Amino acid sequence: MTDREFRLAYVPGVTPAKWVNVWAERVPDVPLTLVSVAAAEAVKFLHDGGADAAFVRLPVDRDGLSVIPLYVETTVVVVPKDHLVAAADEVTVADLADDEVFHPMDDTLEWTALPGLPAFTRPDTTAEAIQLVAAGAGLLLVPQSLARLYHRKDLTYRPVVETPQSQIALAWPTKATTELVEDFIGIVRGRTVNSSRGRTPAPAPEKARKQPRSPAPGGSGRRGAQTGRSRKGHRPR
């Protein structure tokens, strides 16, 4: 048993199960604890020592953090199932120009210009905005994983082209890059169990050189070479 523990935080929409399963196989003596944290609080949570590493949504303040970008998510619009958008395979921001669109306080998409018309309120969270969409009060643009996370039978979503996209990354405090953090980085990057985890390998010990044998007195130090074919002795008839 060990008193060590690896704490991994993750923001809504991220599903860390596949990496957690690999950790359990490779580092069975160190339990991994998952901690759900709001996207806006993830960086402070790391700096406060709440977790060893975290899956965050970019952009974040990288001061004091090491960050490995992982993947980019499709942006979708969440609508009631009877909305006209539901009949399309994908839409553009221009298609939403006449719709009221919610912009929750925890939105992580970097908009240069907000889509659609301003909604009557700005919800504190994406979860609250989903409730308002279900009530028919407006639409919502979010990363696809959040649309799946807050799925409801009365709602659907469609991809929106030419919009900002959210990127998921692994982050940890640079000054706290421990061996366990390096182990997890290797898992996330898909390294095999025998591959290097970025550490400097210890130099291999030098093999002892064999000392040449001293030649026997009167000899050359080598076995005598046969100069001809070996002949079998003839049995007497």
Image: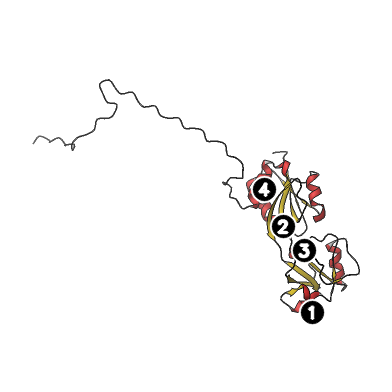
Q: Mark 1 points at which residue?
A: 84
The answer to whether 225 appears left or right of 204 in the picture is left
Residue type beneath disc 3: Leu
> Tags 3 and 2 in contact by the CB under 8 Å rule?
no
Residue type beneath disc 2: Ile
- Where's the N terminus, which quadrant? top right
Residue type beneath disc 4: Phe
Q: 31 above or below 161?
A: above
Would residue 186 be seen by someone viewing this image from the given angle? yes
Task: Identify the secondary structure beneath mark 3.
Answer: helix
Q: Which of marks 3 and 2 is in front?
A: 2
Residue at mark 1 to residue at mark 4: CA–CA distance: 45 Å
Q: Residues within 10 Å of mark 3 (few under 14, many from 20)?
A: many
Picture residue at 80% right of the left edge, 48% below the top: 45
Residue type beneath disc 1: Leu
Which quadrant holds residue 169?
bottom right
Q: Residues within 10 Å of mark 4 (few under 14, many from 20)?
A: many
Q: Name the residue under label 3.
A: 146
Residue at mark 1 to residue at mark 2: CA–CA distance: 31 Å
Q: Mark 2 points at which residue?
A: 168
Q: Residues within 10 Å of mark 2 (few under 14, many from 20)?
A: many
Which quadrant holds residue 107?
bottom right
- Where's the C terminus, which quadrant? top left
Q: Nearer the viewer, mark 4 or mark 2?
A: 2
